[in-house]
Image (tube, grey):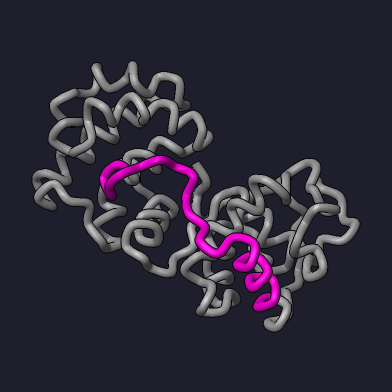
């Protein structure tokens, strides 16, 4: 799990510069033109299913989570159903996902919280979300953005890398990058910025061999010829 205030050394070379505002606007306009309606690659049919999928996605790929939840959601798609399934019966469904023992425990406890404190509904505020077991700031940001339409930016390793490489942000910690992005990204693009940046980091701005020759925002990127350390 990426901690808010932990420096992510070795991911990208830390660079002390910020992209010009007009370049930032042009960059997001280009991303929007290529993908007008970006969204998460996690499969879900309800806010609760999204919450389950995001909790499971910590230190796991969306593909592996989707493979697991495809079977899990057939038998448990509400807090009450997942709670009734129980921790031991839940584990076989998610055993291919990293940290599945801890995640099973968090999910069952989260279902208890949702039923006892929120009438079985996923709460729409950061404070309430972060009070759920297994839900940190990044997970809360994903739920607030994707389910409730708030202009939050959930910074994972992909977004951390892209933001620092391009010059959109120059933070040494996840929280610093998030705060800079919220100031730097023009308001019209803030709602979708999380999705554009994570997809760009996942498929183009790769950690070890970025596809700079295929990059649609290369003209505004400050990465240049710096080597990944």
x then y, percent, for residue 202: 64, 46
Say which residue appears at 72% left-offset and 49% top-offset. Answer: 204
Residue found at x 36% / y 30%: 69
Between 159 and 77, the one nearer to me in the picture: 77
Q: Quadrant of residue 99?
A: top left
Front position in the image: 42 or 158:
42
30 is within the stretch colored magenta: yes
The percent coordinates of residue 49 (x first, y second) are 30, 41
Q: Is residue 107 magenta?
A: no
Q: Which residues are magenta?
A: 24-49
Considering depth in this image, is 135 or 65 the residue closer to the camera? 65
Picture layout, residue 211 above or below residue 22: above
| Extreme residue in the bottom direction | 22
Instruction: Decide if residue 196 is on the left or right side of residue 120.
Output: right
Q: Is residue 131 left or right of residue 152?
A: left
Name the residue: 56% across, 51% down.
6
**Image: 38 above or below 60:** below
Name the spot of residue 92 as percent of width and height, x first: 33, 16
């Amino acid at each position: 799990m990426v901690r808010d205030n932990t420096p992510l050394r070795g991911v990208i070379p830390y660079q002390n510069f910020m992209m010009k505002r007009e370049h930032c606007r042009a960059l997001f306009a280009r991303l929007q033109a290529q993908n007008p309606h970006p969204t998460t690659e996690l499969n879900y049919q309800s806010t609760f299913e999204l919450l389950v999928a995001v909790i499971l996605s910590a230190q796991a790929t969306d593909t592996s989570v989707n493979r697991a939840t495809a079977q899990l959601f057939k038998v448990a798609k509400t807090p009450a159903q997942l709670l009734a399934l129980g921790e031991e019966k839940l584990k076989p469904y998610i055993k291919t996902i990293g940290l599945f023992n801890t995640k099973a425990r968090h999910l069952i406890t989260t279902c208890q919280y949702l039923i006892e404190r929120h009438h079985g509904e996923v709460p729409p505020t950061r404070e309430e979300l972060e009070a759920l077991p297994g839900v940190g700031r990044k997970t809360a940001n994903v739920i607030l953005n994707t389910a409730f339409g708030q202009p939050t930016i959930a910074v994972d390793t992909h977004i951390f890398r892209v933001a620092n490489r391009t010059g959109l942000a120059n933070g040494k910690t996840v929280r610093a990058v998030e705060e800079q992005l919220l100031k730097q990204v023009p308001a019209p693009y803030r709602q979708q910025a999380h999705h554009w940046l994570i997809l760009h980091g996942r498929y183009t701005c790769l950690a070890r061999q970025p596809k700079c020759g295929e990059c649609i925002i290369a003209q505004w990127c400050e990465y240049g010829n710096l080597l990944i350390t």
